Image (cartoon, helix red, strand yellow):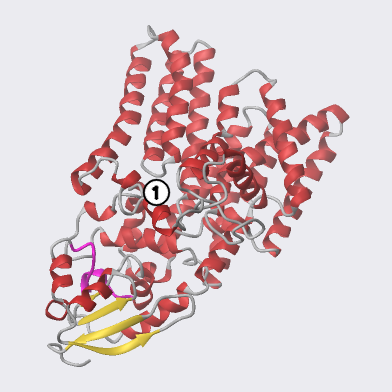
Amino acid sequence: MIRRDDLAVAVAATVASVLALAWFAAHHELLLYGDAVAHLHIARRIFDTDSPALSNLGSVWLPLPHLLLMPFVMVTALWHSGLAGAPPSMLSYIAAVVAMFRLAKRWLPSRWATLAAFAFAINPGLLYMQTTAMTEPLFLALFLWALVFTAECLHAIDAGELHRAARPLLLAGILLMCAVLSRYDGWVLTALVGILLLSRVRKVVAGPVRFRLAAVAFTVLVITAPLAWLWFNARYFHDPLDFLRGPYSARAIEARTATPGHAPHPGYHRPWIALRYYLRAATLGAVPGVAGNLVLLAMAFAGTVVVLRKAMLQGIALLLWFPLAFYTYSVAYGSVPIFMPIWPPNSYYNTRYGMELLPALSLFAVATVYALARWLRHDKFWLGAGYAVALANALSLALATPLVLQEAKANSATRIPFERAIAEVIQPIRPDQKLLMYASAYAGALQDAGRPLRETVQESDYYAWPVALQDPAGQADYVLAVDGDPVAAAVAAHPQRLLAVATITCQGQPRAILYRSTKSAAP
């Protein structure tokens, strides 16, 4: 049943979402993240290759985001422009804002819960991310709604109304299954929610049949999801843990890029440093300046105490902080560094992970203001002040450029011109002529050129790819070799009948050479 206040929040979030899309699309910023381009590429290659198969999902990134993108990347114009990434993320953003409102109402009056949802919704970084193919908005929606339904289930159990607990328990299971298939944070979230529910459900084993069936379904869903991914890795990549230790895993990338004898990054095996980096990324994405960061953290921690003193759904409140523990561990021991320009190594990397702490920061900071307003007995004044500060803060972040957008711009500064240069060179190639290239690394070039993947020979073509690397000129009409990639190695080993027709150089990027097979007629 749709509630009137939920609907009002959803309508407001929809307006904000559409306006943000219009702004960032007009400024050509939907494809700044290389990962956004890669997500669209993975979704496209499921069906648009000479070897269409689910195995083209790959072994590292989880499958659900790409399956959700697939209907939109089928439209070449949406894929070419990057707009294909927007619908799933926009719907996730709207759902996350409504869930934030529903969750906040568990501890705050409705108008104060609206303020918490407002502060969350107008974060410029989140508004930007929800226009892209990145997975953060989807996970936030699944995370918050899973907590909403878990809270409803626990409330019904505590009230002795087990017949009302079955539906939210089942819905929580479905959402957690989706979270497990979206991001690896979802695996930890699911385990924590499962432990929390188990501590209550085991006391009511003799409940109604409907409730017991929901409990069984919940268990099956949350266990089946990770097992399915392990099976997928074993079936297609011959190692159930390929996502963890395979050649494209975070661990393998860290090993390839690390300088021998030096720590890969400042937080490596140093949890305290990892904690500082994650907290700073989270707070810099929420408020500007060092002083603002410290004030926000103090308010959030104080608000957590305010909420915990209410002695209801305390486990749910604490779960809002779970990203802090997850990412502190991941940075220290999971080969997932976070870089910011203010601290060594003074660059940008993975700052978007701090966004998962935005619900906790928003809700608990508002809880502190609410407690202060009740103590001073000036409810309306402090509520109005809260809206004014939240709006001023969002405008300040937007004018200074949100942290996640700063990262996207910095890391795309040389990649995008390079991909556009490649696109210009390969665009004249006729559709009936095959292009051999390592597509995953430079998917943006194919996207810019609007060239379907099936017109290329690339690494997703499991049968054609190894054969083409042994005979580039015989298996393709054109060959794009980028220094250091497998195609360049194949050209060096088998240069026969290949004529260089274009060389692409771009500052900060490797050299690319386009070859024409002498068996092919000139375009």
State the image coordinates of residue 445 (x, y, percent, origin top left).
Answer: 36, 74
Q: Amino acid at mark 1?
A: Arg
Residue in the picture at 43% in, 38% down: 186
- Position of residue 365 measured from the top left corner of the image (x, y, whole percent): 71, 38
Tell me the quarter of the picture where residue 44 sits: bottom left
- Using the rendered view, name the quadrant where residue 346 is placed: bottom right
- Furthest-top residue in view? 206
The answer to whether 508 appears left or right of 66 in the picture is: right
Q: Is residue 471 above or below residue 18?
A: below
Residue 209 left/right relative to 52: right
Extreme residue in the front direction: 261
Residue 111 seen in the figure? no
Query: For the residue labelled by badge 1, is the local secondary structure a helix, a strand or a loop?
Result: helix
Q: Is residue 169 above or below residue 41?
A: above
- In the rendered structure, the answer to whether residue 497 lies left or right of residue 501 reads left
Image check: 223 left or right of 48? right
User: Magenta span covers which residues?
Assistant: 450-461
Picture coordinates of residue 159 (x, y %)?
Answer: 54, 12
Residue that mark 1 sits on: 251
- Out of 83 and 396, give the one closest to the viewer: 396
Residue 82 inside the magenta-drawn segment:
no
Residue drawn where x is 32% and y is 51% of the image: 67
Q: Quadrant of the C terminus?
A: bottom left
